[in-house]
Image: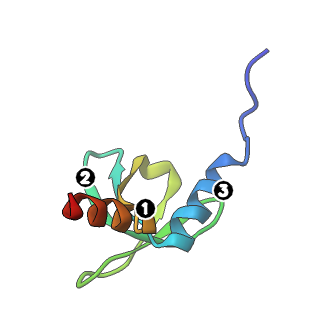
Amino acid sequence: MPPPGETGEEALYLRFLSEKRIAVVVKLRDGESVSGWIEYFDDAMIRLTREDKPNLFIYKHQIRTIRELARRSGNRARQENNGSAN
């Protein structure tokens, strides 16, 4: 039996990226890449907010991949502080 088409994990992941304002690179099916953070999403599209550039509404069927650039978290700051103390 094939796996279910919808697991709900996509929405959870996009919500996580949006709430944490994690910078992402969105690679489109035509090969172009754009970066920013996901401010809004629904079943059909995402809104990619970019600094110093127009914001984009991208249909999900145009997206090949979404990759995190870096997570803004306390873990990174702790790692950097621990590295500089050594």
- Which residue does the image show at 73% across and 41% down from the upper left? 7
Which label is found at residue 75?
Answer: 1
Q: Secondary structure at mark 3?
A: helix
- Which residue does the image show at 49% across and 59% down from the upper left? 59
Using residue 10 as the reference point, say whether residue 29 is left or right of it: left
Which label is found at residue 8?
Answer: none
x and y percent of residue 84 in the render? 20, 63
Judged by depth in the image, the label closer to the viewer, 3 or 1, is 1
- Which residue does the image show at 40% across and 68% down from the upper left? 72
Q: Earlier in the sequence, mark 1 or mark 2?
A: 2
Residue lying at the far bottom of the rendered structure: 52
x and y percent of residue 35 in the render? 30, 64
Q: Is residue 22 above or below residue 11?
A: below
Can residue 24 be seen by looking at this rendering?
A: no
Disc 3 to disc 1, how far (Cα)?
Answer: 21 Å
Using residue 35 as the reference point, say whether residue 46 is left or right of it: right
Q: Amino acid at mark 3?
A: Leu
- The residue where tag 3 is placed is 12
Using residue 50 as the reference point, say whether residue 2 is left or right of it: right
Quadrant in which the N terminus is drawn: top right
Quadrant in which the C terminus is drawn: bottom left
Judged by depth in the image, the label closer to the viewer, 2 or 3, is 3
x and y percent of residue 13 in the render? 59, 55
x and y percent of residue 10 in the render? 62, 50
- Residue closer to the observer: 29 or 48: 48
Which label is found at residue 32?
Answer: 2
Q: Amino acid at mark 1?
A: Asn
